[in-house]
Amino acid sequence: MGFVLFESGQHRCVAYSDLVRGDDGVQANQFLIKHGDASALMDPGGALLYNPLVLALGRDVRPHEIGLILCSHQDPDIIGAIDKWLLYTKATVVCSKLWGRFVPHLVPHYMENAGRERYLLVDDEGARIPLGDAHLVALPAHFLHSVGNLSFYDPTSRILFSGDVCSGLVPSGREYAFVEDFEAYRPCMEGFHRRYMASNRVLRLWVDMVRDLAPEMIVPQHGMPFRGEAMTQMLDWLSRLDCGIDLLGPMHYRHQVTREATPAHY
């Protein structure tokens, strides 16, 4: 069942948060933005989620009528099933120009109508994306997990869809709800951000942009959404967080390796 983030007139934003089965993969959210007859699906995921997502979307939109597939970055939990969306819809894929030549590697060469005409490539400074008589904005979030990372802002709902930035690693099946107590929730975010964000300098640049934008909500690809005081506290924390290359030293680059690889446990 989708979680309605915003609904007013002909504009509707829905989150799907509970489609990952148990421990099969990391919990991930997918988002639908619908404006009249126009619709955009954000970060739809890989093969693990394709069938469950199609079934969930059926309550809100005819999946084959989706017009845009918005991709914040290139990971499998973002675009792993892009071949199916290209095959079964007429949607245009929106992604960073850095990944425009890599995404087609996920698409079989024999598929018709899956060439460059199906892509909108976003320059580093971002872009306006038409959605019916409204629009969305692709915003730079480069090096915040991916060198060509994007956030997507919906001016109508004033929701910032932040991708992996602001994400929390929560168990599958946790009830989707706005964060009320940031300090209690912070442990879900800390390890992920310290490892996957490039540096505090880049985080501060992104946070300054977001503060100037002043969204009503920040909704990440993993974990819970933010608004109000919890959102303010979360941005303050990000602006001070040492992460990525800030934490590296010679001890992380050694050629003497004694530890064996271990079986997967998520």
Image (cartoon, grey):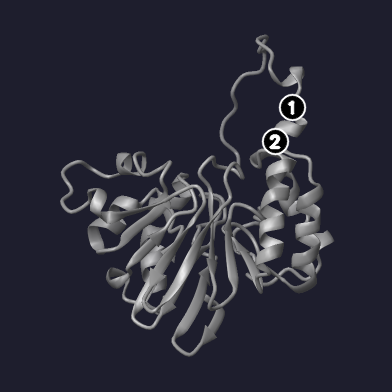
Taking the spot 38% from the left edge, 83% from the top edge, the residue there is 36
Residue 238: percent from the left, percent from the top?
A: 76, 52
Q: Quadrant of residue 197?
A: top right
Q: Residues within 10 Å of mark 1 (few under 14, many from 20)?
A: few
Residue 226: percent from the left, percent from the top?
A: 69, 68
- Viewer-side residue, 57 vs 12: 12
Image quarter where the C terminus lies is top right
Contact? badges 2 and 1 (CB < 8 Å):
yes
Residue 237: percent from the left, percent from the top?
A: 80, 54
* 33 sits left or right of 218 in the view: left
Is residue 109 depicted above or below 129 in this figure? above
Taking the spot 31% from the left edge, 75% from the top edge, the residue there is 62
| Amino acid bearing label 2 | Gly
Mark 2 lies on residue:
244
| Amino acid bearing label 1 | Leu
Q: Is residue 175 in view from this perspective?
A: no
For numbered disc 1, what is the local secondary structure? loop
* Residue at mark 2 to residue at mark 1: CA–CA distance: 7 Å
Mark 1 lies on residue:
248
